[in-house]
Image (cartoon, helix red, strand yellow):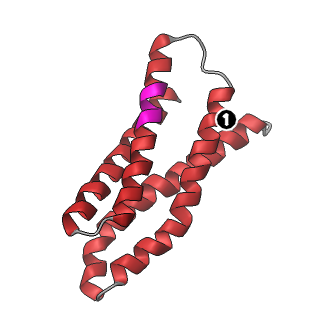
Amino acid sequence: MLSVSLDTLRVFLHVLAATVWVGGQLTLAFLVPALRATGEGVTKAAARAFDRVAWPAYAILLATGVWNLLDGIGDDPAYRRTLEVKVAVVVVSGVTAFLHARAKTRGALAAFGALSGLSALAALFLGVMLG
C-alpha cells in the first residue's frame, strides 16, 4: 500500500474543497427551478445553507492553492502561465459568487451566478490540466 504524505493530504483537501465549491454550485443551479416552485424564500434559504459549506470550501481551496504554490511550480513556462490563469479564474469565481449573493435583481443574480459557475468550471478544468 502506498504511504500517506503531507502532499497527499494537501491534494485531498484541495480536491474535496473543489468538489464542494464547483459541484455544489452546479447542483444548486439545477435545483433552483424546483425550489422556486415550492414557495417564496425557499431558494434563498437553500442558497444560505449552501453558503455555510461553500465559503469554507473556497477558503480551503485558496489555502491549499497557496500551499501548492509554495511547494514549487517548477521552471516550465507553460505550466506557470496555466497556473497564473487558474489563479485569476479562481479569484473571478469567488468575486462573482460574492456579488451573486448580494445581488438584488433577478438579472444580476443570473449573471453573477452564471459567471461564478462558469469560472469555477474553468478553474476545475485548468486544475486537471495542471495535475
Q: As rendered, which of 11 and 106 lies closer to the eye?
A: 106
Q: Give me the residue at 41% from left, 71% from top.
A: 47
Q: Which residues are magenta?
A: 83-88
- Where in the figure is residue 27, as x and y percent of width and height? 38, 64
- Where in the figure is residue 6, as x and y percent of width and height? 77, 37
Q: Quadrant of residue 112?
A: bottom left
11 vs 109, left or right, is: right
Q: Give me the residue at 36% from left, 57% from top.
A: 99
Q: Quadrant of the N terminus?
A: top right
Is residue 124 at least partly visible in the picture? Answer: no
Q: Main secondary structure of the magenta part?
A: helix
Residue placed under numbered mark 1 in the picture: 67
Assign a secondary structure to mark 1: helix
- Where in the figure is residue 53, as x and y percent of width and height? 55, 65
Q: Quadrant of residue 4?
A: top right
- Where in the figure is residue 120, as x and y percent of width and height? 40, 46
